[in-house]
């Protein structure tokens, strides 16, 4: 048993080192960005990110009982909190001290860096200096980094990695020969990078599988058209034969006899054509049958391969949960509490990538339950409760594509009035709005960054970061998180996650004349509503679902696109998709619900890292690139739009003239997305793949504006702009550069060559682009 515990501890520490390295790298990058003295929202964003990383590192260190790292993270976190609240200035001495602390923490992760005792004085001195920084200015410039152990954090290989076949094993005796059958193992070690690469390639097979299905449907449609024409032709032929018979009966002279002769020749031609059509029909039927066979074969092989590769990625939840009992025990003891952790469903398997991302959220929720939820034994006895508290983690599979995690405690619950008060103090809601919120709406505010009901900040919690991190990470995985709490009885968090990443079931809808994909995991239902069932509440349309009033809005309005007529409009009905995220539900009117199918979502790439309301893109079987919508963004945009003065998107877009824009972009995904955005705004769009292609298009067409990337082959955006400005024919043509190059030097070069606008893709927002274009033309 001791040997098993030692092996488990080694695996646990190896996992922690990998995670800690990621946290430290992110913190270090954030400090480097702070040294550039950013202002406003950018500064706040960087500090918030580094703040969260320090908070997560502290929790992970506590889970593996690394007290030195945990102790150093506490004042580090406090400094970032002071920076966030503008109580401390990001001075060069302070940033030097923070860098030294991060370097020292990295040294603690590497066993070869020396005995822990030799590093204690360094860590202790840094902790004291961080504490001093919180109470006043640093007494002297920070000690140079050269005086500290210069050991960067490294990712340590798992302790259980077996020795190479020819590697000597120091046992003192010569190893005995292994039996022949032991040379064949049922398992092998494969790097996760290689496994992820195979997974991506297997997932890419989804596109040709969908394309083959589309070809079968197209052949079926062609066969149906041919069959329909064949029936129509037979009807025409019968009519002609009847006409021939009538002509023969009425013909009395030579001139009249010419009619039946010509009719006979026409009928002979139709007979020959009929034989040709029969041959074509037979070949088309044979081709359709072959295509169906190929499609079934490809589907079977693709599904089987994808299933097997997905199985390779699956790990049981218990591989994550095994660290939790000790974490709960140690933290509960430190607070003088007696807590039992009950785990159910640990054998359920889920994608390894999701499992890795869920470790921090689970630790945050357990820490909240221990610190805020479960009362101390004496208080529990006063409340007629057992002296020991209970926290349960229950995992269950909802259906073939979803898994549910429930984390519940039997503690004090969450006081909604305290949540309202905290939100009011932070200015998240006004006092009037806070007062009008119901209990469920107030509880939803706990997921906002900074909100905490704790009266003080401790080394465990109270900073209001934990639940904000939980929601952020769960939503990034395509999941949802909801909260229920009963005062005095306890709190329960319900997390629903997809079993796998990348490919998922999607609902294809049409809005503003374009197709979009909505992840099915967020679609509560699809409904058809009669116009008379739409009610207006406070100047907003609503419908009744399950006895509840649900807000109703146009998806095209939220996406800032013109409205189009819906399929059921003439019948007095409309189609809507009800989206749910946690306790929030909104129904979106769409022009058409095309169907549901498995889709592979592709990221937009670094050029368009964050486009509001869009999570990625997918390619349908037809080859069409379709945006995948971000449900969390959609709900936020709908709420924001509901609170803004009413201005129908259709009326705004009708005013936009059909002006012509040339989009120059070498990335097919970015090019398709920009084209979609601009066409949705009412512009005519022509695309080019680089500067040379664009300049050729300028010579052959007429354009009102150019939107160009910068980094492209053959001729980049800077050279294209300079060439346009040097040509008298295009000297006044507006040029907008949309690029990932955001440095001051690149901006200045854009201005020097004559660009009218320079938009950085990392902060790209479609409304910003449209606003710039509307000003220039």
Image: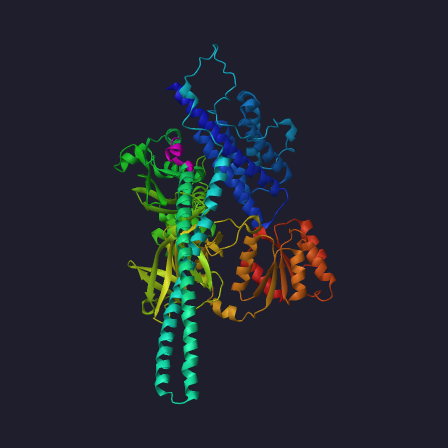
Q: Nearer the viewer, residue 159 or 152?
A: 159
Q: Residue at x 43, y 65 (%)?
A: 276
- Looking at the image, residue 127 sits to the left or right of residue 527; the answer is right
Viewport quadrant of the N terminus: top left
Figure quadrant of residue 235: bottom left
Q: Is residue 352 above or below residue 635?
A: above
Q: Nearer the viewer, residue 150 or 634?
A: 634
Figure quadrant of residue 773: bottom right
**Image coordinates for residue 385, horizontal then vertical, percent:** 26, 36
Can see residue 430?
Answer: no
**Image coordinates for residue 299, horizontal then vertical, percent:** 40, 47
Please provide the residue range marked out in magenta: 312-322
Can see residue 210?
Answer: yes
**Image coordinates for residue 383, horizontal then vertical, percent:** 27, 38
Q: How many numbered circles are shown?
A: 0
Q: Nearer the viewer, residue 596 or 110?
A: 596
For this orientation, the residue located farthest to the top is: 173
Q: What colouring style does the render use?
A: rainbow
Q: Residue at x 38, y 74 (%)?
A: 237
Please say whether residue 383 is one of the residues in the magenta stretch.
no
**Image coordinates for residue 148, horizontal then vertical, percent:** 62, 27
Viewport quadrant of the C terminus: bottom right
């Amino acid at each position: 048993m001791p040997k098993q515990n030692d092996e488990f501890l080694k695996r646990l520490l190896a996992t922690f080192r990998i995670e800690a390295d990621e946290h430290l790298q992110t913190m270090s990058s954030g400090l480097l960005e702070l040294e550039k003295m950013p202002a406003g929202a950018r500064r706040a964003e960087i500090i918030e990110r580094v703040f969260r990383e320090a908070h997560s590192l502290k929790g992970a260190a506590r889970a593996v009982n690394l007290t030195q790292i945990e102790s150093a993270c506490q004042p580090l976190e406090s400094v970032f909190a002071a920076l966030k609240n503008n109580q401390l200035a990001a001075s060069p001495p302070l940033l030097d001290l923070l860098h030294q602390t991060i370097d020292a923490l990295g040294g603690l992760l590497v066993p070869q860096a020396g005995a822990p005792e030799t590093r204690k004085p360094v860590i202790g001195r840094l902790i004291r200096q961080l504490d001093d920084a919180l109470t006043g200015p640093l007494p002297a410039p920070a000690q140079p980094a050269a005086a500290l152990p210069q050991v960067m954090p490294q990712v340590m290989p798992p302790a259980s990695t077996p020795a190479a076949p020819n590697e000597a094993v120091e046992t003192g005796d010569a190893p005995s020969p292994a039996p022949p059958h032991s040379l064949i193992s049922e398992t092998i070690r494969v790097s996760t990078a290689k496994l992820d690469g195979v997974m991506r390639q297997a997932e890419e097979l989804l596109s040709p599988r969908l394309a083959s299905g589309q070809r079968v449907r197209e052949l079926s449609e062609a066969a149906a058209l041919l069959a329909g024409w064949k029936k129509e032709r037979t009807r025409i032929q019968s009519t002609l034969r009847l006409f021939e018979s009538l002509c023969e009966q009425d013909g009395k002279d030579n001139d009249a006899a010419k009619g039946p002769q010509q009719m006979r020749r026409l009928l002979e031609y139709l007979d020959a054509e009929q034989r040709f059509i029969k041959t074509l029909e037979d070949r088309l039927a044979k081709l359709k049958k072959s295509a169906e066979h190929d499609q079934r074969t490809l589907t079977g092989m693709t599904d089987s391969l994808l299933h097997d590769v997905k199985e390779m990625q699956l790990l049981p939840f218990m591989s994550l949960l095994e660290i939790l009992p000790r974490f709960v025990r140690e933290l509960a003891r430190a607070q003088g509490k007696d807590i039992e952790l009950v785990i159910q469903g640990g054998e359920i398997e889920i994608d390894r990538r999701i499992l890795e991302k869920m470790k921090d959220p689970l630790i945050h929720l357990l820490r909240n339950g221990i610190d805020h939820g479960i009362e101390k034994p004496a208080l529990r006895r006063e409340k007629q409760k057992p002296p020991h508290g209970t926290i349960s983690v229950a995992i269950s599979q909802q259906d073939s594509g979803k898994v549910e995690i429930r984390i519940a405690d039997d503690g004090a619950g969450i006081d909604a009035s305290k949540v309202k008060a905290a939100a009011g103090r932070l200015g998240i809601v006004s006092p009037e709005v806070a007062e009008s919120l119901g209990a469920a709406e107030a509880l939803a505010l706990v997921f906002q960054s900074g909100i905490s009901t704790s009266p003080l900040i401790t080394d465990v919690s109270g900073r209001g970061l934990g639940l904000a991190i939980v929601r952020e990470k769960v939503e990034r995985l395509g999941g949802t998180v909801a909260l229920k709490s009963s005062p005095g009885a306890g709190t329960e968090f319900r997390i629903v996650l997809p079993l796998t990443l990348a490919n998922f079931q999607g609902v294809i809808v049409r809005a503003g004349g374009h197709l979009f994909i909505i992840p099915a995991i967020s679609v509560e239902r699809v409904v058809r509503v009669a116009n008379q069932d739409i009610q207006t509440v406070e100047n907003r349309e609503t419908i009744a679902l399950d006895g509840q009033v649900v807000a109703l809005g146009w998806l095209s309005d939220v996406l800032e696109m013109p409205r189009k007529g819906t399929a059921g409009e003439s019948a007095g009905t409309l189609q809507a998709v009800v989206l749910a995220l946690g306790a929030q539900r909104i129904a979106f009117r769409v022009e058409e619900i095309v169907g549901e199918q498995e889709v592979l979502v592709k990221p937009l790439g670094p050029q368009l890292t964050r486009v509001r309301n869009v999570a990625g893109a997918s390619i349908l079987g037809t080859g069409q690139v379709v945006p995948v919508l971000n449900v969390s963004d959609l709900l936020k945009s709908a709420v924001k739009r509901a609170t803004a003065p009413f201005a129908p998107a259709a009326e705004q877009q009708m005013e936009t003239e059909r002006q012509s824009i040339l989009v120059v972009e070498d990335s097919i995904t970015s090019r398709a997305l920009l084209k979609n955005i601009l066409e949705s705004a009412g512009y005519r769009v022509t695309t080019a793949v680089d500067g040379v292609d664009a300049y050729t298009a300028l010579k052959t067409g007429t354009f009102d504006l150019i939107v160009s990337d910068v980094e492209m082959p053959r001729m980049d955006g800077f050279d294209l702009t300079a060439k346009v400005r040097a040509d008298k024919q295009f000297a006044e043509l507006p040029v907008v550069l949309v690029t990932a190059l955001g440095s001051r030097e690149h901006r200045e070069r854009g201005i020097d060559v004559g660009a009218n606008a320079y938009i950085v893709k990392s902060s790209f927002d479609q409304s910003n682009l449209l606003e710039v274009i509307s000003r220039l033309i």
